[in-house]
Image: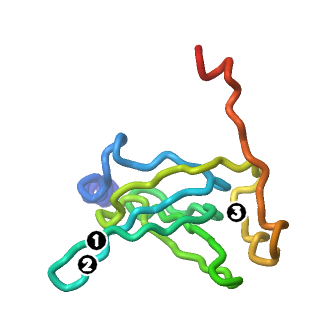
């Protein structure tokens, strides 16, 4: 009984299927976040590689990592947050793991991931 009630409450806070961003681990994405500054609202873009996804339902989170001035910066975002305006996938990476924490130890060109290219024949059909 309580699990059904929890699911019902979660459904009200979750975004619809069309609004949830479609991306995978290893993708390079731009996260457009709404920032409130006093009375004004603006959009700030955080771009980087998705290194992890965790949780389920309304508690689902994803971690994005980027390098700023030679220093690694990671930021966690809730998937169903109303503060996320949109998520754009810039490129898709080929990965064989669910969590890319090993990228934290790498520097320079070693951080790059191979790009996953879509087959043109699959696209047209």
Give the vertical position of 12 relative to 51 (above or below): above
Q: Alpha-carbon distance for marks 1 and 3?
A: 31 Å
Image position, residue 112 (x, y; %): 77, 61
Q: Nearer the viewer, residue 114 or 4?
A: 114
Where, quadrant-wise, is the N terminus in this rendering? bottom left
Left or right of 89? Residue 14 is left
Give the vertical position of 20 relative to 18 (above or below): below
Q: Nearer the viewer, residue 119 or 18?
A: 119
What residue sits right under mark 3 in the picture? Answer: 99
What residue sits right under mark 2 in the picture? Answer: 36
Which quarter of the picture shows residue 103? Answer: bottom right
Around disc 2, counting alpha carbons within 10 Å, would you say few (fewer than 14), some (14 to 19), or many (20 or more)?
few
What label does residue 97 carry, if any?
Answer: none
What residue sits right under mark 1 in the picture? Answer: 42
Q: Secondary structure at mark 3?
A: loop
Q: Alpha-carbon distance for marks 1 and 2?
A: 7 Å
Image position, residue 4 (x, y; %): 30, 53
Q: Secondary structure at mark 1?
A: strand
Where, quadrant-wise, is the C terminus in this rendering? top right
Left or right of 89? Residue 85 is left
Image position, residue 102 (x, y; %): 79, 70
Q: Residue at x 44, y 49 (%)?
A: 21
Q: Residue at x 49, y 65 (%)?
A: 61
Which quarter of the picture shows residue 67? Answer: bottom right
Q: Residue at x 83, y 66 (%)?
A: 109
């Amino acid at each position: 009984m309580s699990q059904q009630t929890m699911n019902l409450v979660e459904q009200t806070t979750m975004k619809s299927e069309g609004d949830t961003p479609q991306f995978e681990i290893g993708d390079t994405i731009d996260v457009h976040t709404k920032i409130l500054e006093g009375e004004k609202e603006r959009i700030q873009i955080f771009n980087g590689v998705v290194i992890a996804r965790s949780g389920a339902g309304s508690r689902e989170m994803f971690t994005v990592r980027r390098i700023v001035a030679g220093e690694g910066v990671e930021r966690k975002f809730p998937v169903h947050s109303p503060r996320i305006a949109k998520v754009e996938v810039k490129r898709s990476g080929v990965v064989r793991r669910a969590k890319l924490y090993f990228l934290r130890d790498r520097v320079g060109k070693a951080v790059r991931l191979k790009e996953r290219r879509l087959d043109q024949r699959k696209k047209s059909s």
